Image: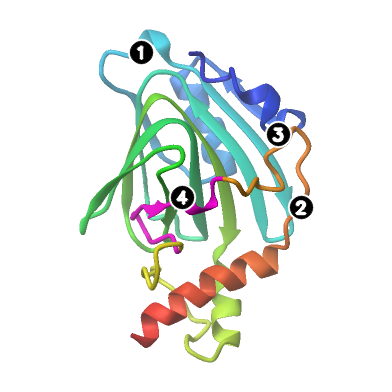
Amino acid sequence: MNAGALANTRLADFARVSTASVDDAAEAIGRIFCPHELKPTGHSENDFSAQHNCAAFDGFSVNYVAYGGSVSIDPGCLDRFFLLQIPLHGCAEIRTAARAVTTAPGAAASLLSPTVPTQMTWRQDCAQLILLLDRKLVEHRAAARGNVGESGGVRSVGRPHRTVWTCASGTNLRSRRSRRAPWSDKAPVAPGGSRLAGTIAQCATQRTAS
């Protein structure tokens, strides 16, 4: 399947990148997210394509990202944002120094910390819906809860229960399969950035408190 095949139903009005060039994809997507190393893997060079649709709001953005074939992605530390990645097609392996997990549609999603170096491998024409949340927004919400200071105290998110995403750790999505994300249609409906940041901050402060 071509990586752009699902683009028509995922934020198609907000297309930012569509290319079959690895270098062009790394540069263009790097400007939206952060600089990163991008390489086709498993002899999938001829299958490579990249699609990135992005709807940006104040403090967060909703993104659809798809790669044809299999690719390795090394962004290091994200630094200025959290990334919540929800698989729509294929699968992704996410690795940190502490652990590695595999995410897939209906099974697991991932939340990447801005302070933990991460490497990923997206396989089988992987496509993901990605929520980018500004780190300062999350840290501000965490500080408002009184558990974490605003000077960078939110570093990772724990797993207080099975519906919470963790940094480079999957969580079971089956209990939420019937809940359709409000931004899953062609035209997104802007969710509340502060409310989303507060949810992640709550998870982080629960981990800090423990």
Residue ID for mark 3: 11
**Residue 90 location (% of width, % of height):** 41, 28
Please identify, in this view, whether the residue under mark 4 or under mark 1 is nearer the observer.
4
Secondary structure, mark 1, is helix
Residue ID for mark 2: 190
The answer to which of marks 4 and 1 sits earlier in the sequence is 1
Residue 39 visible in rendering: yes
Compute the Cα span from label 3 to label 1.
26 Å
Front-most of residues 180 and 11 = 180
Type of amino acid at the residue the image marks with label 3 = Leu
The answer to whether residue 43 is above or below residue 144 is: above
The answer to whether residue 1 is above or below residue 172 is: above
Q: Residue 100 colored magenta?
A: no
Q: Which residues are magenta?
A: 164-177
**Residue 182 location (% of width, % of height):** 71, 48
Q: Is residue 123 left or right of residue 86?
A: left
Q: Is residue 203 left or right of residue 5?
A: left
Residue ID for mark 1: 45
Secondary structure, mark 4, is loop
Secondary structure, mark 3, is loop
